[in-house]
Image (cartoon, grey):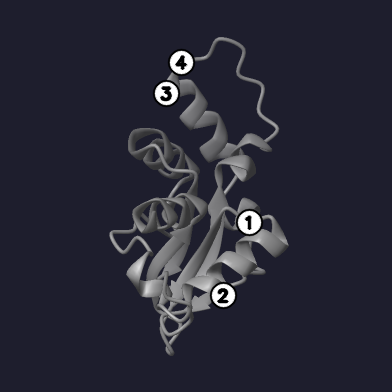
Amino acid sequence: MKKNELVSHVMSNNIISVQQGQSLSEVRHKMVDSNIHHIPVLSGQKLIGMISFTDMMKLNVVINGADDRTIDSIIDQQFEIRDIMNRDLTVLDTKDTIRQAANLLAENNFHAIPVTNNSGDLEGIVTSSDLIRYLSDQY
């Protein structure tokens, strides 16, 4: 295992993201359809926030037996992306190391950290699963 290997070697770079003006139902469908738990929110290419599956679960929506269309309608009428996204982000730079990523994930109990370039454009996302796969490949 290389101590100074760059995070760009383990990050996912085929990122599913949303633009700030999209609806929450689109976020919900992307999470469900792609089986992901974190979605970066962008303004153009700039990272401005993150939405986690946990954030979506916190929405105070009563849906007792509602179908997908009704659920989508309810969340789109009551909320916007900016209402639930986390704006106070910890990010990694493409030049940061895997060790730095692991330390941040462990110290902050995160499960995903966006990776940006010097301009703040989203380049990738590193998750706890990415690090586990990396470790598994090492042994």
> Which residue is located at x 46 percent, y 15 percent?
67
- N-terminal-most mark, 4 or 1: 4
Question: As displayed, is residue 36 above or below residue 107?
Answer: above
Q: Which residue is mark 1?
A: 110
Determine contact: label 3, label 4, CB under 8 Å: yes
> Secondary structure beneath disc 4?
loop
> Which residue is located at x 44 percent, y 67 percent?
42
- N-terminal-most mark, 4 or 2: 4
Q: Residue furthest top?
A: 65
Foreground pick, 21 / 113: 113
Residue 45 seen = no
> Secondary structure beneath disc 3?
helix
Question: As displayed, is residue 40 above or below residue 37?
Answer: below
Marks 4 and 2 sit apart, C-alpha to C-alpha, by: 43 Å
Rendered image: mark on residue 69: 3
Marks 4 and 1 sit apart, C-alpha to C-alpha, by: 32 Å
Tag nearer the camera, 2 or 3: 2
Q: Residue furthest left?
A: 14
Question: As displayed, is residue 2 above or below residue 114?
Answer: below
